[in-house]
Image (spheres, grey):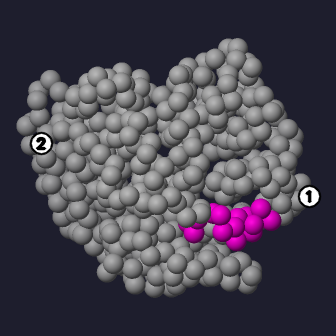
Amino acid sequence: MNQFVAISALALLLQACSRAPEPATPAPRSVPGTIAWIKPEGANIDPIFVKAKAANKPVFLYWGAVWCPPCNQIKATVFNRQDFIEHSKLFVPVYLDGDTAGAQKLGAQFKVRGYPTMILFRPDGTELTRLPGEVDAAKYVEVLGLGLASSSSVKESLATALSSGGSALTPAAWRLLAYYSWDQDEAQLVPQKERAMTLHKLAQACPPEQREAASRLALKAIVATAVDKTVLPDRDRALARTREILSDPALARENFDVLVNYGAEMLPALVSAGSDDRNNLLLAWNAALDKFAIDTTLSRADRLTAVAAKVALAKLALPKDAAPKLDAGLLTQVRDAATTADKATTNTYERQAVIPNAADLLSEAGLLDESDALLKAELPKAVSPYYHMLVLAANAKTRGDKAASLDWAERAWNESKGPATRLQWGSGYVNRLIELAPQDTARIEKAATGVLAELEAAPETFYERNRRGLEKMGRHLIAWSNKGQHAAIVKKLTAQLDGVCAKLPPQDETRVACAGVFKLRPTGVKA
């Protein structure tokens, strides 16, 4: 997912979607409905792998949700490409929607969190690679082809690269490592705390003649270090490498997604505030972003993201949480980008990704009224308008209008669809109430009671995103209780949830998970 759409909407409650590709140039002729998607029966995916093994075909697993903007973008711009459809004949395509029965349990089984996540498996169920949702569609299909043709998994290639050096791997193996979805690894290759150092080692080991793979690994290593807020092992070298990539049009274009999505994290890690190095690097970065913003070989969504990256870089110079004060030229660029995206995007599903991105771009530039107008106009025709309502709620919060923010968040929950989605939206609304209106005891109790009332007493309910959402809501309610006279309410909610937990199989791990939501009992409340 483009990073800037997450700033306001996901900060409200989602933290849900990953970056997604979209084709830059017109995609090959579409043949709708010709991918033979298979949907698992409940939480049991074993029969699918049995069939795949018998047919000696890899398995392609797509994990997404109806409301998710980048998921809809994938559907509108990747899954309908003829080259992707042709590739789908070589594997068993599995479609897993997060709201279907058993989906959250399967999500936990395969260690997936963000929507969409796409994994390629061998016929025997061994994971080959996690596909990068952040690249454009043509590159995505290329990487998919590399995965299908590979005799080694990314995990095996990683072990070889770290133990034997760069010469032991083929160019294709290096490209798969470089284009692995490191952001969605979920400790499948390396523990989170080792990811940045592993990427630095890979960048050093990658043969220089593999220019694209080497440059991408170098940038990914810098990103991982910046995100982890650790010190770059060789700052001067990292800075020189970044300058080299920015100054090379071909390398910059190949890595546009990294440069666009992580500029605001990378720049402070590479150069000190106020230094000449920082000013020069900022100029070079903005020059590259300006090229991306008018590059018609990039998609509308990617061009939007390039402008959003300029806004993020400009805001680095402002005090934290300060109101945006952008120059007139950048504000004009923001407005033009949002207007163009709105007028040019006609596909209903693609708009589910592009319009929230455009609205969030306007919001980040301080143009809240224009963001609201764009979103409200889209509500009657949106695939999942309740997602757009979260951005409206975030805009209202930014204005300081707590009442409007809560009303939009409540409406979004009321109109959301699907058990996992409703739990996510509902628990997020409860958390927002506690943050913005902790004195509104009746509204908080009513909302929390409503969320718990919709829980199905089935093990599948207490996995993955569902479990995390419930536990977070439980922590907020306990903290709220401990700060006020609300122990009786939390006691009542605890009893309500205990009634659900009691219906779960006695020896099932999910019964423990269910009971753990209010494990840290508020002061004065007995278990």
Location of residue 124 (image quadrant): top left
- Which residue is found at the position 80% from the left and 56% from the top? 249
Foreground pick, 424 / 42: 42
Label 2 secondary element: loop
- Residue 19 vertical position relative to residue 229 in the rendered view, above or below: below
Give the image quarter of residue 449.
Answer: bottom left
Return the disc, 1 or 2, that comes first in the chain's sequence: 1
Q: Name the residue under label 1.
A: 276
Quadrant of the rendered image containing residue 416: bottom left
The answer to which of 172 and 391 lies nearer the viewer is 172
Q: Is mark 1 on a helix, strand or loop?
A: helix
Judged from this view, the residue extending furthest toward the right is: 276
| Relative side of 442 to 245, left or right | left
Secondary structure character of the magenta stretch overall = helix
User: In the displayed structure, does residue 143 sit left or right of residue 102?
Assistant: right
Contact flag, marks 1 and 2 (Cβ < 8 Å) = no
Disc 1 marks a residue whose amino acid type is: Asp
> Which corner quadrant holds the C terminus?
top left
Q: In this view, does 229 lie above or below 305?
A: above
Residue range corresponding to the magenta coloring: 287-302
From this view, report whether residue 50 is shown above or below residue 79: above
Res. 379 in view: yes
Which residue is at a point 19% across and 44% down the rendered structure image? 101
The residue shown at (22%, 57%) is 418
Residue under numbered circle 2: 457
Q: Position of residue 240 (x, y in %)?
A: 87, 44
Residue type pointed to by label 2? Ala
Q: Where is residue 371 in the image (x, y as percent from the top left)?
A: 50, 80
